[in-house]
Amino acid sequence: MHPYDSLREKLVQPFVLLGFVVSATLALSTFALLAQIEERAVLRTLHAELESFRNRRAQNPDAAPANASLLRGHFLPAENLASIKPLPPGEEQVEIRMLGDTDFSILVADVGGRPFALFYDRSYIKSNLEQVALLLLIATGTMTLLSFSVGYRLSRRVVRPIVRLLDDVSTKASQPAPADGRIGFSAQDYPQDEIGRLVRELDRFALRLYSFLQRESCFAADVSHELRTPVTVILGATEVLAELPGLPDGVRQRIAIIQRQASRMAQILEAMLLLGREDGPDHDPACSIAEVIEEAVADCLPSLAGRPVRIELELQAHPILAAERSLAYVVVSNLVRNACAYTKEGLIRVSLFDDALEVADTGVGIPGERFPELMQRHAKGAGSSGHGLGLSIVARVCDRLGWRFSVDSAAGRGTRVTMRFAAAAAG
């Protein structure tokens, strides 16, 4: 399951990132520019002082070099400046070096043919740059917080209609559907923008969807109602015919088949009607799954006539399940009929346990490439004469009842279908 991805966070994050990147870029550019200006000022000062000292020495050979706290000059070599190497006459070099605990910009040149070094104390520059860096850091943090504030306020304005729409949808989804199918959104309650348009389109889509569901529901109810009447008539007629004396055994067998198939049709109609309903049954359902299995097996026995196939029942338990009998019959009947259809010879074993039903056969099996589409509608084997709806109906019933459905099969070694019931049972 993917974690919740907030739309508000998605809107705020670009603002914060943009504010930080812009302010940090400006701060770094400003700091680099100020540092470069300071370095140029130091170089100008050193060269100006060097030219001034050369002029003073030309006029007065005894003129002393500068000796202030910021700027000092020394002839080389000097005892306390052994690390400063003289340069050949006519060459100049500027370097930054730490002497003791202080950084200096050092200009090495010659004055009157003698090696000379001019020292500029960088403590003041370093202090200024540190203050500038602190101010720029504070400005960057302030701009980032301002970007967050603007992004947060803007995201609230953008997301507020969406949150309101989400609350409305959640509220209306938990309420019974109105008679006209409209979910009741009012476009006037939303801004005249994409959100308002979305609300109007949702309302139109809900009405269209309700109309479709209404037609499907009416169709299922009408078909079920119209088919129940002839099925009831057929059942009544077969019961009367079965009581007539003197009927040949062959006729009685065919009457029993008609009666059984009419009963099966009635249960299938009931199951289809239950699957088409959104809510559950009005009563507390309960059925004996063992009786359902015996009935489904009896219905399938005529289809095995003339084939060397045996059906064995292994009823190790007789659980009473909290499920509609018609739904349970549809599941068991489809599983047993599939086993009969794909088993040309051999054995079909139907086993019932406290918490599971197992249908195993020695038929042709299911190829591995068919497993991804096994539960889809109209998916059937190469030798099937049906419409490929059985297992899809089984999957729908299992999903409704909370049963777990699994298939173990391979081509040429038969199929084992296991149905595990829900934990809750009627008794």
Image (cartoon, helix red, strand yellow):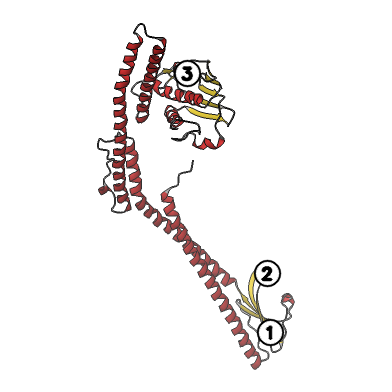
Which SS class for mark 1?
Answer: loop
Rendered residue at 35%/43% (across/down): 166
Q: Which mark is residue 91?
A: 1
Rendered residue at 44%/52% (across/down): 10
Q: Nearer the viewer, mark 1 or mark 2?
A: 1
Contact, mark 1 vs mark 2 (Cβ under 8 Å) = no
Question: Count of labels shown?
Answer: 3
Residue 421 visible somewhere in the drawing: no
The answer to which quarter of the image holds residue 395 is top left
Rendered residue at 30%/18% (across/down): 233
218 lies left or right of 420: left
**Residue under circle 2?**
100
Density class for disc 1 (Cα within 10 Å; few <14, some 14-19, many ≥20) is: few
Which residue occupies the extreme top position in the image?
Answer: 245
Q: Is residue 152 above or below residue 406?
A: below
Q: Is residue 307 above or below residue 19?
A: above
**Residue under circle 3?**
301
